[in-house]
Image (cartoon, rainbow, N blue to C red):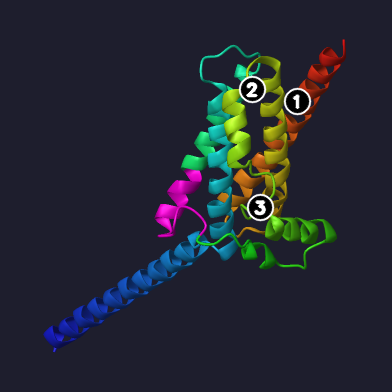
Amino acid sequence: MNLRRLSYGIGLAFALAIGIAAGAQYRELQHARAQLNVLQPSEIDIGFSQSMSFHHRQAIAIAQLLLDGRPTGLAPLAQSIASSQMLELGEMQGWLRLWNQTLLPPTQEMTWMLLGNEPLDEQLNQYLIACGQSAAGMPGIASSEELMQLRRLDGRARDALFLRLMLNHHQGGIPMAQFAASQAKLAVVRKIAAQMTLDQSQEIHQIQTLLAAISASTRD
């Protein structure tokens, strides 16, 4: 009789242990699924990473054109832009690989900016209209002719063109960075978009100051 009770007790304890372990595994699985869902990008995360990757590639190319060894007083600015945007480009490209997405936008349409939690304001509506009217799919992208001109020019004229191209480029990228900073799903995407907005706004102010100085020196 005692053996029966002992066997029953052992069996019950074993069943309870299995039940507890199964419950713990289920909770761990649910937690893992929840964590995985947190890391899943939205269409805004993907669209921003693809579109801004395209945008960054040209900024890097423009900066590198100025860093070809010819004399320029803008080398520190160009190097700073190239270095920071290379780092951001690498980060975005890493996300896109992780998400099994193409590294550049599959189309020129910026429809991912229509997927936010609230309707676009007038400024962003105008930005999307400008995107649709741009040959490159977004404003501020330099044409092939402008890039060739940057290669041909020298001295102050080259510096001035570089600044104008980079000013247009930054002004064309900030609206989508601002949108992603508030509407992207993943915190890491919102963070880098907010940093881009801050950095490029500061660079715009610097560029405008440099352009004003070049303009003033030209008049003297």
* Quadrant for the N terminus in the image: bottom left
* Circle 2/circle 3 CB separation < 8 Å: no
Element under disc 2: helix
- Mark-to-mark CA distance, 2 and 1: 9 Å
- Mark-to-mark CA distance, 2 and 3: 24 Å
**N-term-proximal mark, 2 vs 1:** 2
Element under disc 1: helix
Element under disc 3: loop
Image point (64%, 46%), residue name: 193
* Quadrant for the C terminus in the image: top right
Q: Is residue 101 magenta?
A: yes
Q: Report the magenta residues as a range.
A: 91-105
Which is more toward the observer, 98 or 76? 76
Q: Is residue 162 magenta?
A: no
* Circle 2/circle 1 CB separation < 8 Å: yes
What residue sits right under mark 1 in the picture?
A: 206
Which is more toward the observer, 55 or 130? 130
Q: Residues within 10 Å of mark 3 (few under 14, many from 20)?
A: many
**What amino acid is found at the position of numbered circle 3 in the picture?**
Met
- 84 lies left or right of 119: left
Establish if 208 lies above or below 45: above
**What amino acid is found at the position of numbered circle 2 in the picture?**
Leu
What residue sits right under mark 3 in the picture?
A: 138
